[in-house]
Every structure is written in structure tokens, then in C-alpha cells.
Amino acid sequence: MQHHGEHPSSGADNLMTAKWLSFVTAVLLSGCASLPNTQTGNLDHRTVEYALSQHNTIPVVFESPLGGSLRWWDKVYSAIANDSTVFAYSRAGYGQSEPVSSPRDGHHIVEELRAVLHEKGLHPPYVLVGHSLGGLYMQLFARQHPEDVAALVLVDSTGPARFKGKPMREHWPWWWRVLFGLFAPTIAQQELDELDVTGEQVMTLPTLTEKPVIILSANDWVNDKTEEMPDFIEYHKDFVRLYPGCTHLWVESGHDIPHDNPDAVIAAIRDVLARVSPFTHVMIKGGDS
């Protein structure tokens, strides 16, 4: 029996893998504009690259996709930072952030992020925003620490069992493997190798409930009108069922929604902020303006 959000059919899986590989290559080969207030600091006993804009509001925290640094949010960050506390950072080993020796599974990445937020004086609850693999990490954050979460925005997020049981690189065309090996930083390869572990960490915990959750899905894959589309749509339905009561929106975009359609991401963040802000007051201590 298929469990919700777990095993899409092989047709949908092949299509999604091809699209995802195209996206990852674009991430690895592209450069993004810098964010306002970008800096490095000694946080959690290591150098961390981050951008922080502060207001007396619930902090919005961004998590980037596989291969992406904090600059991935260049078309979204400023619009939200105008009147909200916003924190974006580069995970260990990306951008100017120092690598670490700990495993690159979701549990370690979530705990490192929590430590950095604490050292910057950014206290929960948070609005968590994650794109692609970053969305999987934010799902784990929300399930491990639901008391620290005000809302969750998942931007064409990786599902908990997106590639379960499929050693992805073994199934790639040879030229994809060559490109990934040449251009992907070691840290990206390590995160990819821990993908199944991270998915299992998510699925062993209860889902986030009684908090606003918005799921944005790219509809260009639906518009392909290929024979795999029914399976692909069913995959998304299964993923959405993991978050009962969530808002699910199809977005006119490719997988790279933060760049193809940043207004959709901005609108989703503003939506959840409007819902949670009247009921939660957060005092922010320290940090940079």
C-alpha cells in the first residue's frame, strides 16, 4: 500500500528527476545578486554568512535549495525585510560559510540553524520558508520543534520520500553525473547522499498541526501534458495530504519559483505573517539592523 507523500510512480519519478537535475545544474552554474546586510560572523563556533534585517516582528527564516547560498532569495528578501524581521543564511560549506565535519542530514542542519538563530538573538516562534531541499529541512524543523514555529511556507519543496530507495546518482545519465561531479561542491554531494536519512527523520515525527502551512507547487510540470502528468499530480496530492488543513497553490512557474515568480512567494509569506502576527509578539534582542 502506498503511503501518502512517499512513492510516486516511476513515470512521474523519472520526469521529476529530469526536471530537478536541470534545476540543480542551473543553481550550480548561476550567480545571484547579493542581499542587503550580508555579512559573516562567528556563530555556533564557526564562520557563518548571513543577512539579517530587523523589526519588532516574528522572524522569517529562509532555507535555500541544494547548492544554493543565501543569495538564492535575492528577489524575495528585500520585499519582506522592508517591514519584517528576516534572516537568510548560507548553510555550512556554501557561500562564505565555513564547512563542518558533522553529517549533512536534516537533523544536524536543523540544529545548526537553531544554534545560529539563538546566537543572533532571534527568538521563536519563526515563520519558516524553504525551497526544494530547503523545504525538506524546514519540514523537519517544524516537526522536531513545533513549539518554535508560527507558520511554514514550502516552495516547491522536496517531499520526505522524494527519492526513497533510489540511489539517485546511479540512475542519472552519465553526462549529468559528470556535470554534478565537476560543479557541485562536496557539501551538496554530502547533502544529497543523506536525502533518504533526512526524509526518514521527517516521516518518523508527527506532522505540523494548528499552524498555517502554505505549499506552493510549480505548475509548468503540469503544463507539460505528458503521460506522466496524472502520476505527478497524484504525487503532489499525496504530499499535500501530509499537512491537513494547509493551503496548496499551483504557481505559474518552473521549479525555481523564487526567481520565476517571486511575487507568489512574497504573497505567501505576507499571508501567514498577517495570520500569526496579531496573536504573537516577539521581542528581539541584539543582532544587526
Image: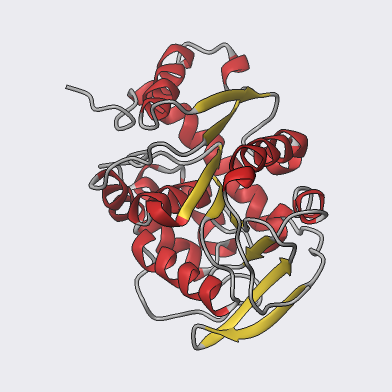
Give the total number of marks visible in the rendering. 0
In the picture, measured across the screen, residue 97 lies left or right of residue 82, that is: left
Picture quarter with the C terminus: bottom right
Q: Residue 154: where, in percent of width, then height?
A: 54, 40
**Of residues 145 and 193, the one drawn nearer to the viewer in this rendering:** 145
Location of the N terminus by quadrant is top left
Tell me the quarter of the picture where residue 223 sits: top right
Task: Kindly give the residue lying farthest to the left in the view shown.
Answer: 1
**Lateral position of residue 193 relative to residue 181, left or right:** left
Q: Residue at image x 60%, y 41%?
A: 22
Where is residue 11 shown, x and y percent of the image? 39, 21
In this view, the residue in front, 247 or 175, is 247
- Quarter-wise, where is residue 217 in the image? top right
| Percent of width and height locating residue 176 | 52, 48
Residue at x 43%, y 43% (from the top left corner): 172
Q: Reply above or below: 179 against 231.
A: below
State left or right for residue 164 relative to residue 233: left
Q: Quadrant of residue 245?
A: top left
Q: Residue at x 27, y 43 (%)?
A: 206
